[in-house]
Amino acid sequence: QVQLVESGGGLVQAGDSLRLPCAASGRTFSTYRMGWFRQAPGKEREFVAAMTWMSGTTYYRDSVKGRFTITKENGKNMVHLQMNNLQPEDTAVYYCTVDTRGFGDRTRPSSYSSWGQGTQVTVSS
């Protein structure tokens, strides 16, 4: 089992930036992919970004391409989501997650096995 802890959320204005760190502990050697999802009130949890751990290949949902960047800290079990030019539609609880199997659809929550508690990001217009 992998434990995940996110932080870095907050209230910002449109156009501002935030950086969300996620620290992983436990059976991190089994990590195939780490990702970020978000969930707005009344909506389903949606894919934001993911990184294949060994290769560093990254994937993004279309609406955040060019604004969000997922990175990892070499030597540490940490991943970050840098969010620039935030917009009100980015308002949601953001969750860090890990996939230890590697054969599911990276955009589906069911492909991931462990989740953090989430961190609130609110963007005012």
Image: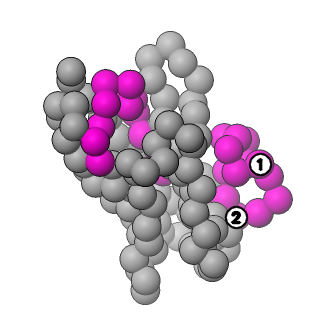
Q: Which of marks 1 and 2 is nearer the N terminus?
A: 2
Give left or right: position of 89 versus 29.
left
The residue positioned farthest toward the front in the image shown: 66
- Identity of the residue drawn at 22% across and 31% down: 14
Q: Residue 104 placed where, x, y %?
A: 80, 52
Q: Does the magenta stretch include residue 111?
A: yes
Q: What residue type is labelled 1?
A: Asp
Local crowd size for mark 2, using a 10 Å CA cut-off: few (<14), some (14–19), many (≥20): many
Q: Read off the magenta span.
A: 84-112
- Identity of the residue drawn at 38% across and 31% down: 90
Residue topped by disc 1: 105
Tell me the number on the disc at residue 100.
Answer: 2
Q: Using the image as rendered, state which of residue 75 and residue 14 is in the foreground.
A: 14
Q: Residue 99 placed where, x, y %?
A: 67, 59
Q: Does the magenta stretch include residue 47?
A: no
Q: Residue 21 placed where, x, y %?
A: 34, 59
Give left or right: position of 78 versus 103.
left
- Identity of the residue drawn at 28% across and 42% down: 85
The residue positioned farthest toward the right in the image shown: 103
Residues at marks 1 and 2, CA–CA distance in whole angstroms: 13 Å
Q: Residue 121 placed where, x, y %?
A: 30, 35
